[in-house]
């Protein structure tokens, strides 16, 4: 849902009330979100909830249920289990890996540790079965007799549960696919959601479309129309909305939707905290106002931030100062902007705060695993709505990053912005180890500009997930024009990652790197050394602080 419960008049219903929705129950597998992605790629709407979801607390009825994989063993004392009411709901169920084992556990507890772990590729063979019900053959309908699948398990079914038939096997798994002879329950030991199972999407489609009979009518265009209608009725004819917009893809796409919905009653604010990329505030301003028609207020607070950061070397303290000052600046200006608009636009007071929250953030916060350890305090603007007593609007709450990119493109947001590498809220301050000074900020900005320009010129920008230049602590000796230079050390970092949870350094051509280093040495005053940092995440993180 796109709100925290606030309503104004007739708010159109949430997507799961409009579309046939497949509910994915998450047992904590690394791939669970991919199941939702694959379904949506098939234009079937899907939502993900924790495996502990009580059905009695669900306000809508799913068209089908998928039980995901998970790291536990169903027979362990503390293993998670679904609400048994799932099996009374009379909707089709597909269990994947742990999900298969959970179905078997529910139907007779025949699951145990296998003698061999099966990890990686496996050859699946479809089985002839004697079942009379038509539904049994639907999961693998129109698929080849032999296909490659991807497995990742150590446990297995010790026996076929009563009223089930085997529909697929591998050399190591006698029950790689099972189906209930009467009810529309299926279990598969392999993972159809990963790309290493080439026919996987067809298995998911067979379940969703053939078995569950879900309509394939979820599209981005219908999403945009509905979301705009939702925002309009939520905000009402006079309400105003403010939003912090960084120029990153999430906040820009959210802002563009807002602009489409309520025009100039939406006020976007960018805080120039002095640790943005070089020329960024001006560039974002131009793109948003001229390119997208969004009126963006830029608060120039560079001196304020940099003065407060003087003498502070501790990373967490730096983050806190930036986060708090951000809120102060934003609050001061937002109220003034609102007052002015009340007069000029004859609009009502500001009641809402726009946030670019994405579905992965929602999934993370509803995970049954509980919050993970804080490695770094991420800067966000979460404190604002409460402090200013505003209600949240989160139009991208149901979308994944790549869906946001598709949406951004369809809303006319330039390619350049849609594919921009993510940039952290505390910006260059967490790319300068130790104290932040104006000189170090300048050096980081200039080196970053050269590095990114060269990456773009080499056609590598889209292959790299995130790249930047950082300034190390201390100084090194160099020699320029026969003179001793006691200058700064720049570290270049470029990583490839899909989810930013793990990452690997990008492998540049050495000669290319040498040329970039040479340019930085020649063009950025005060630099004595440039290094390329190749530590993976883990053990390192992507940012330096
Ligand atoms: N300098 C800034 N001025 C205004 N808002 C900001 C600024 N920096 C961050 N924000 C706010 O904090 C939110 C979180 O930042 P984050 O970098 O995670 O997302 P993003 O900038 O929208 O997208 P991306 O992840 O692509 O950079 C942004 O959506 C935006 O609302
Ligand atoms: O908005 C943000 N506020 C923050 O405080 C913050 N810290 C890290 N990041 C971004 O998160 C991703 C993972 O970064 P780390 O490996 O350094 O934790 C990378 O994409 C980082 O750029 C942040 N983004
Ligand atoms: N990937 C999974 O779902 C694994 C399920 C279970 N933990 C096993 O090892 O068999
Ligand atoms: Mg950003």
Image: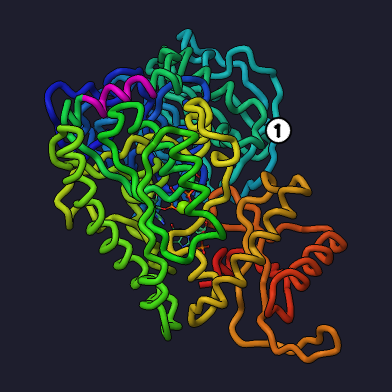
Q: Which residue is drawn at the image coordinates 47% and 20% (left, top)?
A: 43
SS under mark 1: strand
Q: Which residue is drawn at the image coordinates 66% and 66% (left, top)?
A: 447
Q: Which residue is drawn at the image coordinates 71% and 33% (left, top)?
A: 123
Residue 149 versus residue 38: which sits nearer the camera? 38
Its colouring scheme is rainbow
> Is 286 positioned to the left or the right of 174 in the image?
left
Residue 516 versus residue 55: which sits nearer the camera? 516
In the rendered image, residue 112 lying in the magenta stretch gets the answer no
Q: Is residue 108 visible?
A: no
Residue 112 place in picture, x, y as percent: 48, 47
Q: Is residue 79 visible?
A: yes
* Residue range highlighted in magenta: 224-232
> Is 83 positioned to the left or the right of 176 in the image?
left
Q: Which residue is drawn at the image coordinates 49% and 51% (left, top)?
A: 282
Residue 511: image quadrant is bottom right
Residue 124: image quadrant is top right
Residue 508 versus residue 437: which sits nearer the camera? 437
Q: Is residue 17 above or below residue 339?
A: above
Q: Is residue 157 above or below residue 436?
A: above
Residue 395 place in picture, x, y as percent: 33, 35
Location of mark 1 (residue): 123
């Amino acid at each position: 849902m796109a709100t925290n419960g606030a309503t104004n008049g007739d708010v159109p219903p949430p997507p799961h009330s409009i579309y046939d929705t497949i509910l994915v129950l998450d047992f904590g597998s690394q791939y669970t979100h991919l199941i939702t992605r694959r379904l949506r790629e098939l234009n079937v709407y899907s939502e993900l909830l924790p495996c502990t979801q009580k059905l009695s607390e669900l306000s809508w009825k799913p068209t089908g249920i998928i039980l995901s994989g998970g790291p536990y063993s169903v027979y362990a004392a503390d293993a998670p289990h679904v609400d048994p009411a799932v099996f009374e709901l009379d909707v089709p169920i597909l269990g994947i890996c742990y999900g298969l084992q959970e179905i078997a556990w529910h139907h007779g507890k025949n699951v145990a540790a296998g003698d061999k772990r099966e990890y990686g590729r496996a050859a699946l063979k479809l089985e002839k079965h004697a079942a009379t019900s038509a539904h049994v053959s639907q999961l693998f309908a129109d698929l080849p007799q032999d296909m490659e699948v991807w497995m990742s398990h150590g446990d297995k079914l010790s026996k076929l549960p009563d009223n089930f038939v085997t529909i697929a096997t591998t050399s190591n798994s006698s029950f790689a696919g099972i189906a209930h002879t009467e009810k529309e329950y299926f279990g598969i030991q392999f993972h159809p959601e990963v790309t290493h199972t080439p026919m996987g999407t067809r298995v998911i489609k067979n379940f969703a479309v053939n078995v569950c009979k879900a309509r394939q009518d979820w599209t981005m265009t219908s999403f945009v129309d509905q979301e705009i209608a939702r925002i309009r009725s939520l905000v009402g004819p006079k309400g105003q909305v403010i939003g912090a917009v960084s120029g990153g893809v999430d906040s820009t796409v959210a802002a563009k939707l807002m602009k489409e919905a309520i025009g100039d009653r939406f006020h976007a604010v960018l805080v120039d905290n002095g640790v943005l990329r070089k020329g960024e505030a001006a560039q974002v301003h131009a793109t948003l106002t001229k390119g997208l028609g969004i009126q963006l207020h830029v608060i120039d607070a560079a001196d304020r931030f940099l003065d407060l950061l003087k003498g502070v070397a501790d990373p967490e303290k730096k983050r806190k100062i930036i986060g708090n000052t951000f809120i102060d600046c934003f609050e001061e200006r937002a109220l003034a902007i609102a007052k002015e608009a009340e007069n000029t636009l004859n609009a009502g007071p500001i009641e809402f705060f726009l946030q670019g929250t994405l579905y992965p953030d929602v999934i993370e916060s509803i995970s049954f695993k509980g919050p993970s350890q804080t490695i770094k305090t991420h800067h966000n603007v979460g404190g604002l709505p409460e402090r200013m007593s505003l209600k949240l609007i989160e139009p991208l709450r149901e979308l994944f990053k790549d869906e946001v990119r598709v949406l951004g493109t369809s809303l006319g947001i330039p390619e350049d912005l849609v594919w921009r590498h993510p940039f952290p809220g505390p910006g260059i301050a967490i790319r300068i180890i130790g104290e932040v000074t104006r000189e170090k900020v300048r050096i980081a900005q200039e080196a970053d500009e050269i590095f990114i320009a060269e990456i773009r010129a080499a056609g590598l920008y889209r292959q790299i997930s995130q790249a930047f230049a950082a300034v190390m602590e201390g100084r090194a000796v160099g020699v320029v024009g026969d003179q001793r230079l006691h200058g700064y050390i720049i570290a270049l970092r470029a990583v490839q990652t899909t989810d930013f949870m793990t990452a690997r350094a990008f492998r540049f051509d050495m000669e290319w790197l040498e040329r970039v280093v040479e340019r930085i040495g020649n063009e950025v005053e005060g630099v004595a050394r440039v290094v390329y940092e190749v530590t993976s995440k883990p053990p390192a993180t992507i940012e330096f602080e």
